[in-house]
Image: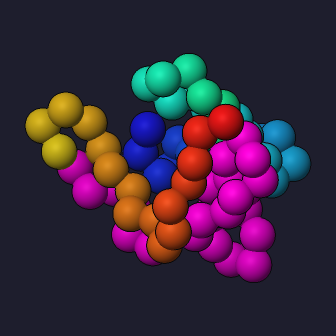
Amino acid sequence: HPSSQLVAAARSHGGHSTLKTVQGEELTVELKDGKVWVVDAKGGKSAVTTADVMQSNGVVHVIDSVLMPK
């Protein structure tokens, strides 16, 4: 999803929104301290540093750390 959709969904749900990865894992998008954060199922957090890198198969958001599946 483009960052505009992620931010809009989080804003409409009190600052948090969830989405599923290709593997079915749940990620939370959180708006905090003027940044967009992605939180994995273990509670690991990564800030989005570069949003909306368009690729032929979708959109990529660069984050500042590694997120892990359950």
- Quick check: is 45 in the magenta stretch? yes
- Quick check: is 27 in the magenta stretch? no
62 relative to 57 in the view: left or right: right
Considering every residue shown, the one lying at the far top of the view is 24
Q: Nearer the viewer, residue 36 or 47?
A: 47
The percent position of residue 60, horizontal first and vertical second, equals 33, 50
- Asked whether residue 54 appears in the rendered view, the answer is yes
Q: Is residue 50 above or below residue 30?
A: below
Q: Is residue 5 above or below residue 49?
A: above
Considering every residue shown, the one lying at the far left of the view is 56
The percent position of residue 35, horizontal first and vertical second, equals 63, 72
The percent position of residue 41, horizontal first and vertical second, equals 72, 41
Q: Residue at x 82, y 40 (%)?
A: 13
67 relative to 2 in the view: left or right: right
Q: Main secondary structure of the magenta part?
A: strand
Considering every residue shown, the one lying at the far bottom of the view is 33
- Asked whether residue 9 appears in the rendered view, the answer is no
What colouring style does the render use?
rainbow
The percent position of residue 33, horizontal first and vertical second, equals 75, 78
Q: Residue at x 68, y 52 (%)?
A: 39
Considering every residue shown, the one lying at the far front of the view is 70
Q: Residue at x 59, y 39 (%)?
A: 69
Which of the 4 image quadrants contains residue 47? bottom right
- Quadrant including the N terminus: top left
**Which segment did they paint magenta?**
30-54
64 relative to 42 in the view: left or right: left
